Amino acid sequence: MDPVSEWGNTSLSAVDPEIHDLIEKEKRRQCRGIELIASENFTSFAVIEALGSPLTNKYSEGMPGNRYYGGNEFIDEIENLTCSRALQAYRLDPTKWGVNVQPYSGSPANFAAYTAVLNPHDRIMGLDLPSGGHLTHGYYTSGGKKISATSIYFESLPYKVDSTTGYIDYDKLEEKAMDFRPKLIICGGSAYPRDWDYKRFRAVADKCGALLLCDMAHISGLEAANPFEYCDLVTTTTHKSLRGPRAGMIFYRKGPKPAKKGQPQDAVYDFEDKINFAVFPSLQGGPHNHQIGALAVALKQAMSPGFKAYAKQVRANAVALGNYLMSKGYKLVTGGTENHLVLWDLRPLGLTGNKVEKLCDLCNITVNKNAVFGDSSALSPGGVRIGTPAMTSRGLVEKDFEQIAEFLHRAVSVTLKIQKEHGKLLKDFNKGLVNNKDIEELKADVEKFSSSFDMPGFKMSEMKYKE
């Protein structure tokens, strides 16, 4: 057997130079590119340090004070501290709200919440994916193919945006809910650029007798309308606008229920035990303690004045980027944004999101193709989603995002030029990407621009690949 000093305390670069080299190349990509994926962010060195800590060594199935393994005294302290900080970060009264911080990420958090409060084949309603919803909210195709496990195990009926305005049609939502009578209504999405009317959702849920769950994964780090005032359950990831590790949380109401006609006076919420049991042992094994420790760090950072300023800047940058694109004559879904993202409708240009995403990738601009309401094919969506959290974490402000919008304008112009010269078919279009001078010039400008900003999480001066 090899000595511990050889296998257990040797650096990554010495043990596995191949992986180390790929990590260094990824650092270069992040540093020299423009990251505009709305669901991504750059976390801090402190969070990364916790993620790479010996906390990953410990098994801790169960809850603090009630584990299936010994040796968890410090793990218990860490998890309790994380829960306390989670409630504090969202200004929640611990006598009225609880939180489970063990979900591995957002999708497991959602399914655990569903498992806790629903029976198989119970009815749910979530925002349709082409309207800006999320797969885990019950998506199935127009042909009836069930894509998400949520739609497989529960009966799902989506609500949609108004085809003209792009805003959620709350009147039709209410009409559908009264006919369908879901047990759970889900608000929240992955590509909806407007604030959510939680008060209206609560009214609809009460009218049809449903529970209300908010999936705030995308907006959990933003100063926005408060879902906790109106919702029974709130789920979230922690790595998007919250700028933490990849993990998940489930918040739930606890304590006495407010007085309601036909309800016992001593009625109390019963979510806590159901949520905890759904997470473990129903759906997960041991929690990932390195993630929970890193989440505690991120939550502490999220309560700082600097983070509040960051959240405000994320929204301001999204507005600036959107306004610049619209000034060039481009169409944005809903005509703008109130959060961290814009959804760019490329259909008036005769382009698909696939082509623009591919060309942007070649220029070191990272966006993602995204369905726009009315798309006939999910494989060739008519839009791209653009988010501001990651580049705002690098210190960019409004004028910088106007420059980014100009880069995007150039990228679309080059895409149109290639399509005109080579044809609309993807195989023909791809030929125009090879040895393209316009792409090379844009890439050089993008890398020069992006490299001028600081990078969270690692020191640019220590990168292996600086150019």
Image (cartoon, rainbow, N blue to C red):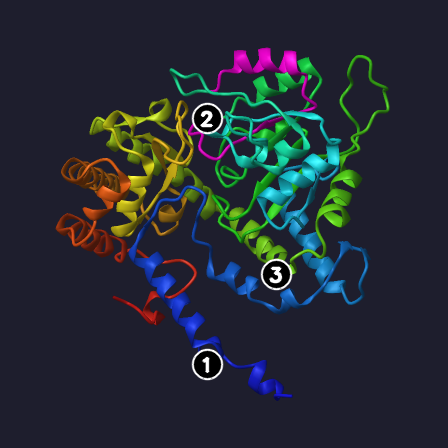
Specify the segment rendered in magenta: 168-195
- Residue 310: quadrant of the picture: top left
Sequence-first tag of 1 and 3: 1
Measure how far apart labels 1 and 2 are at the Cα level. Answer: 49 Å
Per the image, label 1 sits on a secondary structure element best described as helix
Q: Is residue 41 magenta?
A: no
- The answer to whether residue 446 is visible is yes
Sequence-first tag of 1 and 2: 1
Q: Quick one: label 2, few (<14), some, or many (20+) residues within 10 Å?
A: many
Measure how far apart labels 1 and 3 are at the Cα level. Answer: 24 Å
Sequence-first tag of 3 and 2: 2
Between circles 1 and 3, the one closer to the viewer is 1
User: Is residue 103 toward the left or the right of residue 266 in the image?
Assistant: left
Q: Residue at x 48, y 38 (%)?
A: 222
Q: Are marks 3 and 2 in contact (CB under 8 Å)?
A: no
Residue 164 x, y percent position in the rendering: 38, 15
Q: Which residue is mark 3?
A: 290
Measure how far apart labels 3 and 2 are at the Cα level. Answer: 35 Å
- Identity, as a three-letter code, of the amino acid under mark 3: His
Vertical placement of residue 399 versus 164, above or below = below
- The answer to whether residue 403 is visible is no
Vertical placement of residue 258 versus 19, above or below = above
- Identity, as a three-letter code, of the amino acid under mark 2: Ser
- Residue 315: quadrant of the picture: top left
